[in-house]
Image (cartoon, helix red, strand yellow):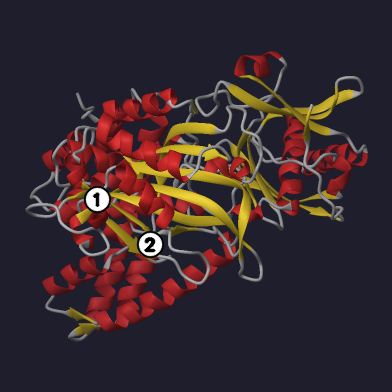
Amino acid sequence: MSPVSTDDIRKAYLDFFKKEDHAVIPGASLIPENDPTVLFTTAGMHPLVPYLLGETHPAGKRLTDVQRCIRTQDIDEVGDASHLTFFEMLGNWSLGDYFKEGAITMSFRFLTEVLQIPVDMLAVTCFEGDKDAPKDEESAAIWEKAGIPRERIGFLPKSKNWWGPAGQTGPCGPDTEMFYWVGNGKPQGNPASHEDEWLEIWNDVFMQYNKTADGTFEPLKQQNVDTGMGLERVAAVLQGKDNVYETDRMKPILDRVMEMADHRDERHLRIIVDHLKAATFIIADGITPSNVDQGYILRRLIRRAIRSARQLKIEHDGTLTPAIAEAVIEQYGQTYPFLQERRQAIIEALKREEQQFGKTLKEGMKQFERAAAKAGKQMDGTTVFHLYDTYGFPLELTKELAQEQGLTVDEKGFAKKFEAHQVLSRAGAEAKFKGGLQDQGSQTTKLHTATHLLNAALRKVLGDHVFQKGSNITAERLRFDFSHPDKMTPEQVQEVEKIVNDAIAADLPVAYHVTTVDGAKAEGAIGVFDARYGAEVKVYVVGDEKKGVFSKEICGGPHVARTGMLGSLKILKEESSSAGVRRIKAVLKGSTEEIAVAQEE
């Protein structure tokens, strides 16, 4: 019998690939560790970047997991049948093991044998080829051999059927995507000819090229497979629903919103469900609303949900967001126990933000009234954008309020201001998050190693209550968040800096060994021992047992071979990150240019 419930599909996927000799590894946090390219984990491959680049994974060359993801690039599409900000991605990986035939054959078998989807309801696409790489006839032939008719195989360009590189250079390659028929009548054609009638449910990426700085594509020595299947979309397909919000785990959350709403509006109901589900998971992973980075995205999601609630005439005085979070925890707490463990922190953060935004809306209304009094017959685009940018008023809300007072709004003027804002935002994002897989280079490797020294030094100076709460590393600097209730004194900052630099000057060896989680605990390795770790872990040791261990920490790597390669550490700033969490920003000066990776002991 085909698994139909969301929970059964999730389990069936892991069970299937476990039987195919894949190690089941835990999904990672929504907050990426040491990855400056993204604010959130957007795909299952992000936590596996070092291993896709050749690092040895403790669990082996075949992996599978369920990864919770956040994507905001399609945020304006949320409210339709299939787009979500938060979703679960089922994934399997080959790290230099099987390639196209293995991946495609297993994908086909899972779809048709385990999920029991009829072949005539499936279609696929492959890369059509260009000057950089040939048409992927190899994948098409494997699909045809497996049982997909030729007319159900479409070929699409690089914009559709190619992944990467994440930055200007690095690993990349063609992909093949799987689709389910959602059109009317008998299935026909393929996504290349009938795009709107096929829903993408799975993607197999074949990393077989390395794009070089001069723009050429060279074959990779280690060919990897990276796959991703959207759990919510597959659940909708198997449960016979025309949208993801009617599936078994999402519907009770939707029902809770509908109970509170004055009238039904599909788009706004769905926005509330999606955004507050995403917010619940983000807060559970340690982020609180703020005006920077992940905290800003979280705040934006919560406030968009509240604005939709306003459209549905739902009270939003601090009661809306906690009620929906309770529904999310009820539906997903068994699969993700940390939601239940952090329930109180989630509820309090949401209630506080909802009440604060209520005050902001009131201030915005005062500004609107002043602007309306001066407007004449039309409110100008600059004012409308100011209400949007400063007070969170979407265009629709301003139009609604203006209409009540017999005014129109300058939508073209607003659009011009908004586009200028978007251009600046994109430029900033590109500057901030430029790079990608290839950014695991020499400087980021050194800074990553430096975070281990910094963590150890902080614990020596401040105490054993200090644990890493997050980090962000670019080629220029490191940012390190740690648990500590008070602002550090200048003397404490100076002492931490000295301890790190003494360790660098001592030119200590850096090496790793593979052990179990229990083994790592027993030997005193630092780590937050939760569900993110698999059965086996890497423990990186700075120093040696004979002369003294400076740091011992669970980590995925990569790291330099000796601390002497780091130069010297300079702490630029110590500040608050959130309640009970401090943040240090630091740089390395005068580090050696050669890089050697820490070896296994």
Image mark for residue 160:
2
Q: Secondary structure at mark 1?
A: loop
State which tag comes first along the sequence, 1 or 2: 1
Which image quarter: residue 342? top left
Residue depth check, mark 1 versus mark 2: number of the one nearer the observer: 1
Q: Is residue 445 visible?
A: yes
User: Which residue is the site of mark 1?
Assistant: 149
User: Do the residues bearing badges 1 and 2 touch, measured as CB atoms within 8 Å?
Assistant: no
Quadrant (top left, top right, bottom left, bottom right) of the N terminus: top left
213 over 347 or under it: above or below: below
Percent of width and height locating residue 473? 65, 50
Q: Is residue 248 left or right of residue 277?
A: left
Q: Residue at x 54, y 41 (%)?
A: 47
- Pick the front one: 561 or 381: 561
Q: Residue at x 35, y 51 (%)?
A: 177
**Mark 1 vs mark 2, CA separation in Å:** 21 Å
Q: How packed is label 1: few (under 14 Cα within 10 Å), some, or many (20 or more)?
A: some
Percent of width and height locating residue 143? 34, 47
Callout 1 amino acid = Pro
Q: Is residue 207 left or right of residue 158?
A: right
Q: Is residue 546 left or right of residue 15?
A: right
Q: Is residue 572 visible?
A: no
Q: Residue at x 25, y 82 (%)?
A: 410
Image mark for residue 88:
none
Which image quarter: residue 188? bottom left
- Pick the front one: 471 or 438: 438
Percent of width and height locating residue 184? 8, 54
Q: How packed is label 2: few (under 14 Cα within 10 Å), some, or many (20 or more)?
A: some
Callout 2 amino acid = Lys
Q: Residue at x 23, y 27 (%)?
A: 3
Q: Is residue 290 left or right of residue 488?
A: left
